[in-house]
Image (tube, helix red, strand yellow):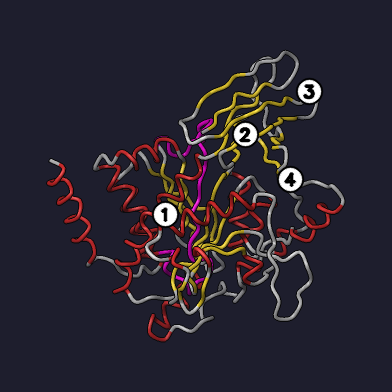
Amino acid sequence: SALQLWFIFFTASLTRASDFQHHAYEEMVRALFAVQSDCPYITRIYSIGRSIEGRHLYVLEFSDNPGIHEALEPEFKYVGNMHGNEVLGRELLINLAQFLCEEYRAGNERITHLIHDTRIHILPSMNPDGYEVAARQGPEFNGYLVGRGNSKEMDLNRNFPDLNALMFYYEKHNGQNHHLPLPDNWELQVEPETLAVIKWMQNYNFVLSANLHGGAVVANYPFDKSREPRIRGKTTYSATPDDKIFKKLAKTYSYAHSWMHKGWNCGDYFDEGITNGASWYSLSKGMQDFNYLHTNCFEITLELSCDKFPPATALASEWLANREALVSYMEQVHHGIKGMVYDENNNPISNAVISVAGINHDITSGTDGDYFRLLLPGTYTVTASALGYQPFTSMVTVGPAEAVQVINNIPNTLFISDFFQ
């Protein structure tokens, strides 16, 4: 009966509440491999590289076909603990992995649907070396900066190639609006952890992402870097061409979170629990802006706790406060349009450019010819173009309904099958 199931679900949750603890590196690795062992058919663990001190940057993947990109199935990622002393994200992502596995095994329809239709990648710790430094201080004595950087004390969120200046220049001169090129020798200018994450982004066609931080409670969306030079004491809103969808993504998290949307947290007020990055404070070389400017991926930064290293006793209630938000945010990867780009012989075309009239930010199709474009409900003029082909344009209506397929087959041009919802 429904009552009985309800009771069983909560007893299972409650018995685990006493198990909430901080995970040092070895414990985190054990926890991830335990999930993989419990759910072997829907998970895979892989390493994207190593930290300076040689710790693996392990990713746990959830999919009904782990290790394989399925055409028209979007790729999603969560990144935690890029600041080593901001630890709640790391613990929440371990909890999320355990939860997805348990709920899938229990037959939860919503989670089953999510795992079957999405390829989810979870990187609980981008900065395992910094974490160990912070953990040695412990929650009681943790300073604001101890363990923030990697083992060379480099802040990884100020370590990505700076593409904003190039983007702002191109905006004025009608230049490229997506996949901006990296500077020469960029590999030599970034830390090993940053290099591993950039290569990861280049190898997977991620559509949506969030990176998890601490020290405030707010959902922060791009751009993080201001277009104007800094005026002392003044901040300016720095909107992307996708400002409306970014606001919607940030609100999805803040309103599904138990208290983020209320605005007053940690002595700060953020209306609806969201903020444009630059209007809070401007930062250069951040990961969030880099995702948007170099890849197809839209990323926001989630600040999740006033206390950067909360005590273990707070972890169970923090998990309950964030659980629905973490799941709801992942589901946003399915909002917008997706489709295939083929030539007249039904060969998929990768790197075709998908542009939406009125939004000055294009995305590209992946190696299988599939593309994903996050959009709010509305009617859009969408054009696919590729070198050597006639561009193909169609009107697409994005609504709240389930995906509908529209096939357009025109000889000697690109042909797109659009899915939208």
For the residues labelled 3 and 4, say whether their Cβ atoms are less than 8 Å apart: no
Rendered position, 29 above or below 106: below
Q: Is residue 79 magenta?
A: yes
Say which of marks 1 and 2 sits in front. Answer: 2
Give the residue type that dot 3 points to.
Gln
Write the residue at 16% across / 56% down.
11
Q: Give the prevailing secondary structure in the magenta stretch.
A: loop
In terms of secondary structure, where does tag 3 sit? Answer: loop
Give the residue type that dot 4 points to.
Asn
**What is the C-alpha distance between the residues marked 1 and 2?**
29 Å
Identify residue for label 2: 379
Q: Earlier in the sequence, mark 4 or mark 1?
A: 1
Identify residue for label 3: 390
Write the residue at 68% across / 64% down.
237
Q: Earlier in the sequence, mark 3 or mark 4?
A: 4
What is the magenta range? 64-90
Identify residue for label 4: 360
Q: Earlier in the sequence, mark 4 or mark 2?
A: 4
